[in-house]
């Protein structure tokens, strides 16, 4: 049977378990927290969770050797974050307590006994002295002791099933939300505290943990209050301990902590551990079970292994997250600081900066107008694709003009046209049409194009002003006065060009009202319309004859009669015939004129508004170069953006330090000739070229990355010639077995020999 090794009374259980092999990993997490990286990404940690008064604080006290408030009711009324750090040699025990809500300096204490009343005092402060209230703000307890590890433990308020008298109706929801937020953090180790004297089927924390951790990869069950198990219930508890009921991948451990009576009697931590050992080893039921299932020391060892293993597995994904955030920060900083030049505070510096910004702005605007989207910022923002959006305006104009076409072939149209032609008839001989009638009809139809054309001009002005303004937000993001100045220039320029474009629309309409064409389209289209109408008349004639005729000759005769009737109506010397012919000519010319008008309007807008925009804005902006007063106002930096830039620079520095810290520990030395590296398996694999030598896997070199990125194995410190001795802490017996082990998980830990 295993025996417990004697340890000093004052040494905490977790501190005892930490050795030189695991301490660097735990130190790294504290380094990341000191950089406030816990605000940027999820960091592996231990969170103690369980029902109210389930013994959570007692477990935390046993793990850390720090006294926590005890009692009934809502004892833990806010999260308590316990940050332990290893003190320097010769430094005595010291601690300080603060809250996340207060900006006051932490309160220092020099002994563990002083912590309990201080934690209670801060709890009352956060909950306004109301014993039934809860606070989401945290108490932060930082301890430096020679025997303490660099580790963070978080004690969360217990789960409340029913609100008690005097308790806020919101307390249950607030506590549940807080616990759920920790449960959902995939890098948080769940320390589920379960009273052994209760039915495990009623334990809420296990159900919640199973929902977020169905595989049980990060849940450890801790059975407390072993001395309160009712007679006859030992077998049920043993079934839980041995993973026969409510099994967890990481299993269960049962502990017996100091009771309030033990504390009152002055029972020391050392005596409590000895009492715990004696209780389990002499117990008639539990004494026959595996000793690794009992005691704080065994729990400590399991937590340490699981936590360090999680840190090792998560290191590569965490680095990837940090690098992704670092890339985003750099991109935002690049956009903000492209023209940030503190040296350009006055004189020629402002002038040079003004010229540089205007040139960059005009270059981007010219590319947007030309539809040449080379810059990434334009490519990713569809709103900046000016010419693409301009084509939509042109297409809308074309559709509106096309929709205004009269129904030239409808009988109602031809009848109205015949009546109007009669009303306009002058000295023309019978059979002749008046050209003046044609001009008047066309002018009437063409006038319907004026509205859509002017709407297109107005929409183009709005579009150009929108893009021109949005570009200032990119090019001169930190200079609000300069942005407004350029926007005003763009508005004035576009007002001028819009006036020219509107005048052009009027001019084009006037031209179209005086019909003219020098190409063959009109004659060809008139002939086509006439032929189409004749073809339709033939088809209808035969259909009518076939409906009444009884033989081929009868049908032919009937069709001939129908065609004769149609010909007399459409080609006789009468109003109906004249209207039929006029409608064909009007339709042909309307088609020609509408297409020509749309093309000319679009080309005119393109020439007067789009093509001249960038050049005109540049001319006007260059006039500011010699206006010192305006330049001084233009380059007054936006205070909000200046603050944001400082925040980004600070975040960038923290991310870079965090990245460097993780990179330095991605290679873990375990001896003068042993190296352990943690690599992530992605779509390109591990990036290693491997060979075999007497059954051992040898690193021959590195695969080039198709995407051109750096090889992660090289960055992690792998060297050609390294011998892969173990994969994921498993030995292999052949080359193929070792390679297969590398393909079983998304993160691979390689032990290398050198």
Image: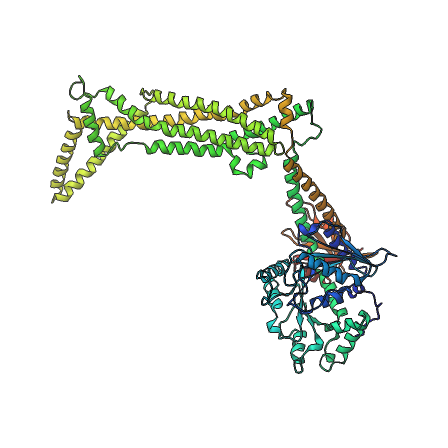
Where in the figure is residue 21, as x and y percent of width and height? 79, 59
Nearer to me, 404 or 700 = 404
Q: Residue 671 appears at what percent x and percent y? A: 82, 58
Q: Residue furthest top?
A: 427
| Residue 456 place in picture, x, y as percent | 42, 30
State the count of labels. 0
Q: Nearer the viewer, residue 565 or 5?
A: 5
Frontmost residue, 615 versus 529:
615
Q: Quadrant of the N terminus?
A: bottom right
Horizontal arrangement in the rendering, residue 273 relative to residue 173 (left or right)? right
Foreground: 477 or 367?
A: 477
Identify the residue at image location x=72%, y=46%: 654
Question: Does residue 708 appear anywhere in the picture?
Answer: no
Where residue 507 appears, as percent x and y from the top left, is: 38, 20
Give the residue at x 50% y 30%.
464
Tell me which colouring the rendered structure shows: rainbow
Left or right: 51 in relation to 516: right
Q: Residue 154 appears in which quarter of the rendering?
A: bottom right
Q: Is residue 317 visible in this depiction of the protein?
A: yes
Determine whether 200 is above or below 65 in the image.
below
Say if 341 sits above or below 263 in the image. above
Task: Answer with left or right where residue 487 lies relative to residue 657.
Answer: left
Q: Residue furthest right?
A: 90
Quarter of the view holding residue 566: top left
In which quadrant is the C terminus drawn? Answer: bottom right
């Amino acid at each position: 049977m295993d025996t417990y090794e004697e340890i000093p009374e004052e040494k905490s259980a977790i501190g005892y378990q930490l050795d030189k092999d695991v301490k660097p990993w735990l130190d790294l997490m504290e380094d990341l927290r000191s950089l406030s990286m816990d605000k940027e990404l999820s960091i592996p940690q231990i969170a103690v969770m369980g029902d109210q008064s389930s013994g959570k604080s007692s477990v935390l006290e046993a793990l850390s050797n720090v006294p926590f408030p005890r009692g009934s009711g809502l004892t833990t009324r806010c999260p308590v974050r316990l940050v332990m750090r290893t003190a320097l040699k010769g430094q005595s025990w010291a601690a300080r307590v603060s809250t996340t809500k207060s900006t006051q300096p932490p309160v220092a204490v020099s002994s563990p006994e002083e912590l309990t009343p201080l934690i209670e005092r801060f709890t009352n402060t956060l909950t306004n002295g109301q014993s039934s209230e809860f606070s989401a703000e945290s108490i932060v307890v930082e301890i430096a002791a020679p025997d303490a590890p660099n580790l963070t433990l978080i004690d969360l308020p217990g789960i409340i099933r029913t609100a008690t008298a005097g308790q806020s109706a919101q307390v249950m929801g607030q506590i549940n939300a807080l616990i759920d937020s920790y449960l959902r953090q995939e890098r948080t180790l769940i320390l589920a505290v379960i009273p052994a004297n209760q039915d495990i089927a009623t334990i809420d924390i296990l159900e919640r943990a199973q929902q977020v951790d169905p595989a049980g990869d990060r849940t450890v069950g801790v059975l407390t209050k072993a001395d309160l198990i009712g007679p006859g219930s030992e077998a049920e508890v043993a079934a839980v301990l041995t993973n026969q009921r409510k099994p967890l991948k990481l299993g269960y451990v049962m502990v017996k902590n100091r009771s309030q009576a033990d504390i009152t009697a002055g029972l020391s931590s050392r005596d409590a551990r000895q009492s715990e050992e004696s209780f389990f080893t002499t117990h008639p039921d539990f004494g026959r079970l595996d000793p690794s299932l009992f005691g704080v020391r065994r729990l400590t060892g399991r937590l340490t292994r699981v936590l360090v293993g999680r840190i090792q597995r998560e290191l590569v994904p965490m680095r990837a997250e940090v690098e992704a955030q670092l890339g985003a920060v750099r991109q935002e900083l690049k956009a903000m600081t492209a023209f940030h030049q503190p040296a350009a505070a006055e004189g020629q510096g402002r002038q040079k900066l003004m010229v540089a910004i205007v040139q960059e702005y005009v270059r981007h605007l010219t590319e947007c107008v030309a539809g040449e989207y080379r810059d990434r910022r334009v490519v990713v923002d569809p709103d900046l694709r000016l010419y693409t959006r301009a084509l939509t305006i042109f297409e809308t104009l074309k559709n509106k003009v096309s929709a205004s076409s009269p129904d030239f072939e409808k009988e109602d149209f031809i009848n109205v046209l015949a009546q109007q032609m009669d009303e306009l008839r002058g000295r023309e001989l019978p059979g002749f049409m008046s050209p003046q009638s044609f001009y008047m009809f066309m002018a009437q139809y063409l006038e319907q194009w004026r509205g859509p054309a002017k709407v297109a001009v107005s929409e183009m002005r709005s579009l150009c002003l929108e893009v021109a303004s949005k570009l200032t937000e990119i090019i001169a993001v930190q200079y609000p006065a300069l942005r407004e100045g350029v926007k005003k220039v763009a508005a004035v320029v576009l007002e001028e060009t819009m006036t020219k474009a509107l005048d052009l629309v009027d001019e084009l309409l006037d031209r179209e009202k005086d019909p003219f064409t020098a190409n063959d389209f009109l004659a060809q289209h008139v002939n086509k319309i006439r032929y189409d109408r004749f073809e339709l008349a033939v088809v209808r004639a035969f259909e009518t004859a076939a409906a009444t005729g009884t033989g081929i000759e009868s049908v032919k005769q009937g069709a001939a009669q129908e065609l004769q009737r149609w010909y007399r109506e459409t080609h006789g010397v009468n109003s109906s015939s004249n209207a039929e012919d006029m409608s064909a000519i009007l339709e042909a010319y309307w088609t020609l004129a509408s297409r020509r008008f749309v093309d000319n309007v679009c080309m005119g807008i393109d020439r007067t508004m789009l093509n001249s925009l960038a050049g005109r804005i540049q001319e006007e902006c260059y006039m500011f170069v010699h206006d010192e007063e305006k330049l001084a106002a233009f380059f007054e930096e936006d205070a909000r953006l200046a603050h944001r830039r400082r925040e980004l620079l600070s975040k960038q520095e923290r991310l870079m330090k965090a990245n460097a810290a993780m990179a330095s520990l991605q290679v873990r030395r375990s001896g003068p000739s042993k190296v352990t590296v943690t690599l992530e398996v992605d779509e390109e694999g591990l990036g290693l070229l491997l060979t075999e030598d007497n059954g051992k896997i040898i690193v021959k070199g590195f695969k080039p990355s198709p995407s051109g990125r750096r090889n992660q194995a090289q960055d992690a410190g792998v060297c050609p010639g390294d011998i892969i001795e173990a994969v994921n802490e498993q030995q292999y017996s052949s080359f193929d077995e070792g390679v297969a082990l590398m393909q079983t998980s998304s993160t691979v830990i390689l032990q290398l020999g050198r």
